[in-house]
Image (cartoon, rainbow, N blue to C red):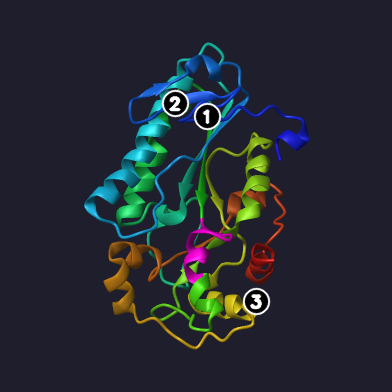
Amino acid sequence: MLQQGGHEVVPISRGRVTGGVQWDPEAGRIDAAGLEGLDAVVNLAGENVSGRWTAGKKRRILESRVRATTLLAHTLAKLARPPATLVSASAIGYYGAHPPEDAVDETSPAGEGFLARVTSAWEQATAMAAAAGMRVVHARLGMVVGRGGALGVMLPLFRIGLGGPVGTGEQVVSWIALDEISPALLHVLATPALGGAVNFTAPHPVSFNELARSLAAVLHRPALFRVPAFAARLALGQMGEEMVLTGARVRPARLLETGYTFRFPELGGALRHALA
């Protein structure tokens, strides 16, 4: 999308990329010279949070985010011609679990739990860039609705008519369409007034019950089966507790206040687009 708009894009990769910047966050190495003179940097790196959270998995989730972001922020801060903007991914796990009736936005404090601690440390890792005068934006992503991720895990059961809500189904799912993320990032890059936390969630979050009904309707299947909470805890452990059985009603206040128009504001349309 950036290239279609006439911009030059410089990829940052752990492998060799023609015209790109090489880095190795675990070893603390990055090609600083290749970052000179850029207008903005977007950092989305981090270990996938899906899967059972063993001690090793939790360490990788935290360290992959904090190490990479710290290395990037420190390197950018020392450049002779640093970028004006650093957009660094985060997640709505920052807010922790909230009752379905409670709404949170970018002014809400950090919550409790592993994801809240990870996202807090992830965001703090950009401190050097902010101290150097860069505009730093924390893109707090909700559940991404695309063919992979959480939806990819749910699809096989729903396609054969065995899908349904998990637990009570009343927990709130704050989501964003995969194809909404790039336009929203472009909006952030082009809006100097945006700094700090920005929620990347659609304006209409849903309950897990609604998510199950919408997905089943798009697939023309029933959603009659409910996964008991104890089964989710048994199968997924702490990850199931924090990411499946609880949630938060997250409002994208900063995007809306700065005039962003959502392409996929409703879940049904986002699901039809993702599964077309």
Q: Tell me if residue 216 is in the magenta stretch.
A: no
Q: Residue at x 38, y 71 (%)?
A: 245
Residue on which the image places disc 2 = 23
Q: Are marks 2 and 1 in contact (CB under 8 Å)?
A: yes
Secondary element under disc 1, as helix, strand or loop, is strand
Residues marked 3 and 2 touching at CB (< 8 Å): no
In this figure, which residue is indicated by the disc labeled 3?
218
Instruction: Give the quadrant of the N terminus.
Output: top right
Direction from residue 7 to residue 204 in the image, left or right: left
Tag 3, which secondary structure?
helix
Q: Which badge, 3 or 2, is on the more N-terminal residue?
A: 2
Q: Which residues are magenta?
A: 142-154
Q: Quick check: is 152 in the magenta stretch?
A: yes
- Give the residue type at disc 3: Val
The numbered disc on residue 12 is 1
Q: Position of residue 237 (x, y in %)?
A: 28, 66
Disc 2 from disc 1: Cα separation:
7 Å
